[in-house]
Image (cartoon, rainbow, N blue to C red):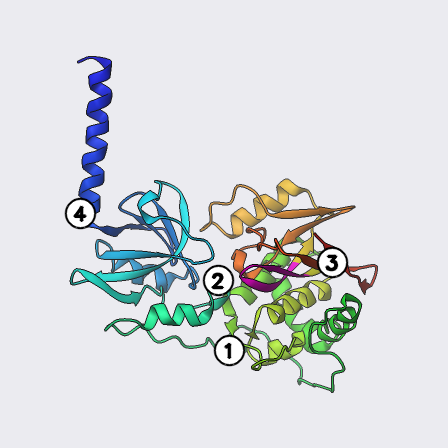
């Protein structure tokens, strides 16, 4: 057989295989973890809105070979027909039964929904999930049992606040962050110490990982009051069993890092889809290869080859955004502007970027 005929033969086989898949439809071939699956076309899909839990992994394994529909996130669209083998996509997945989409979202673990991971609005997600005849698994906020977690906190004390919202004037936000990041309050300090102690010793990247991972996996999303903004103190978020929106999460993580001797930076950014707040931590004092190695070891479910960082003078900031899922995950799109509030030399500062 000539070389040209061999090429044509191979192309024919590939087209035939693609035709079979298109007729058979998309199915889950392998389950990588509680939120990531490999489809029968070879593409990897990380399901938006869920955390990689052991319970979720078992739930997804029961759905292998079922016909599914992949729903792209409207903020990060892609063509399902052009999905490539081995490439990771972030999307919703819903079951397809009886020849038409049953509109049942695959929520691995059933109760592990985390709206922090959802780029689409929560309303859009609920619209996806509720359409059609099937009942979406009930989503219940996770309540942290501090006794079970061995996190014993002192009595909580709350006082009147002067600042509790973001301002257009960045200098006023400094005063707000001084109020919100109450890392020197025994309630917040005790919480941070308990988490950091799981990677005992002088301040280290393992402690940062422990704080981020615990807060990320135990956080429940709750909106601010209608038509108003409220940035909760770190102690308030802890006292409410780790609940709130993105800026509340950012304040909590930053406060915990401050409480154990680190340097955080809180960011606010905007794009055409809206605004977001997230935290970074300065890792300039550590060997970067050691940091990457430690994060890879602690988050084996992700194929981590590099870390999302931002150099700024003598500082190297590592992304700790809840949308990133692990320390050093991809940055939020701040294409329409970004304000940074690094904590340097014992005080909050402000810098506007792009």
Disc 1 to disc 4, how far (Cα)?
48 Å
Q: Name the residue under label 2.
A: 117
Residue at horizontal 30 percent and vertical 71 percent from the top: 131
Residue at horizontal 18 percent and vertical 49 percent from the top: 24
**Sequence order check, earlier mark of 1 and 4:** 4
Q: Residue 275 appears at what percent x and percent y?
A: 59, 64
Q: Residues within 10 Å of mark 2 (few under 14, many from 20)?
A: some
Farthest residue, direction top: 2
- Image height check: is 339 above or below 192? above
Is residue 321 or residue 326 the one in the foreground? 321
Disc 1 to disc 3, how far (Cα)?
29 Å
**Span of residues in magenta:** 267-279
Residue 93 seen by the camera: yes
Q: Mark 4 points at which residue?
A: 23
Residue at horizontal 75 percent and vertical 70 percent from the top: 173
Q: Quadrant of the N terminus?
A: top left
Q: Mark 1 points at which residue?
A: 145
Q: Residue 219 appears at what percent x and percent y?
A: 52, 70
The answer to whether the residue labelled 1 contacts the one labelled 3, judged by CB atoms less than 8 Å apart, is: no
Q: Which element carries disc 3, helix, strand or loop?
A: loop
Q: Mark 3 points at which residue?
A: 263
């Amino acid at each position: 057989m000539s070389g040209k005929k061999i090429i044509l033969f191979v192309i024919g086989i590939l087209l035939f295989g693609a035709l079979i898949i298109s007729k058979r439809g998309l199915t889950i071939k392998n389950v990588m973890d509680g939120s990531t699956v490999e489809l029968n076309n070879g593409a990897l899909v990380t399901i938006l809105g869920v955390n990689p839990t052991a319970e979720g992994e078992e739930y997804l394994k029961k759905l292998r070979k079922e016909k599914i529909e992949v729903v792209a996130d409207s903020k990060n669209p892609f063509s399902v027909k052009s999905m490539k083998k081995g490439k990771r996509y972030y999307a919703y997945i819903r079951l397809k039964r009886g020849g038409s989409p049953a509109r049942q979202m695959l929520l691995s673990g059933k109760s592990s929904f985390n709206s922090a991971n959802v780029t689409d609005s929560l309303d859009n997600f609920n619209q996806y999930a509720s359409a059609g005849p099937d009942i979406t698994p009930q989503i219940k906020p996770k309540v942290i049992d501090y006794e079970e977690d061995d996190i014993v906190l002192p009595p909580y004390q709350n006082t009147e606040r002067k600042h509790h919202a973001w301002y257009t004037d960045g200098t006023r936000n400094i005063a707000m962050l001084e109020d919100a990041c109450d890392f020197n309050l025994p309630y917040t300090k005790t919480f941070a110490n308990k988490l950091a102690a799981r990677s005992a010793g002088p301040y280290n990247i393992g402690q940062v990982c422990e704080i981020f991972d615990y807060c990320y996996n135990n956080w429940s999303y709750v909106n601010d009051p209608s038509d108003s903004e409220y940035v909760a103190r770190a102690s308030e978020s802890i006292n409410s069993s780790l609940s709130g929106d993105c800026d509340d999460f950012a304040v909590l993580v930053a406060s915990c890092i401050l409480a154990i001797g680190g340097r955080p930076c809180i960011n606010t950014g905007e794009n055409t889809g809206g605004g977001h707040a997230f935290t970074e931590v300065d890792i300039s004092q550590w060997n970067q290869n050691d940091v990457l190695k430690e994060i890879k070891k602690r988050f084996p479910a992700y194929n981590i080859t590099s870390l999302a960082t931002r150099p700024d003078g003598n500082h190297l900031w590592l992304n700790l955004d809840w949308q990133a899922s692990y320390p050093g995950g991809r940055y939020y799109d701040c294409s329409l502007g970004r304000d940074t509030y690094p904590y340097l030399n014992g005080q909050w500062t402000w810098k506007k970027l792009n």
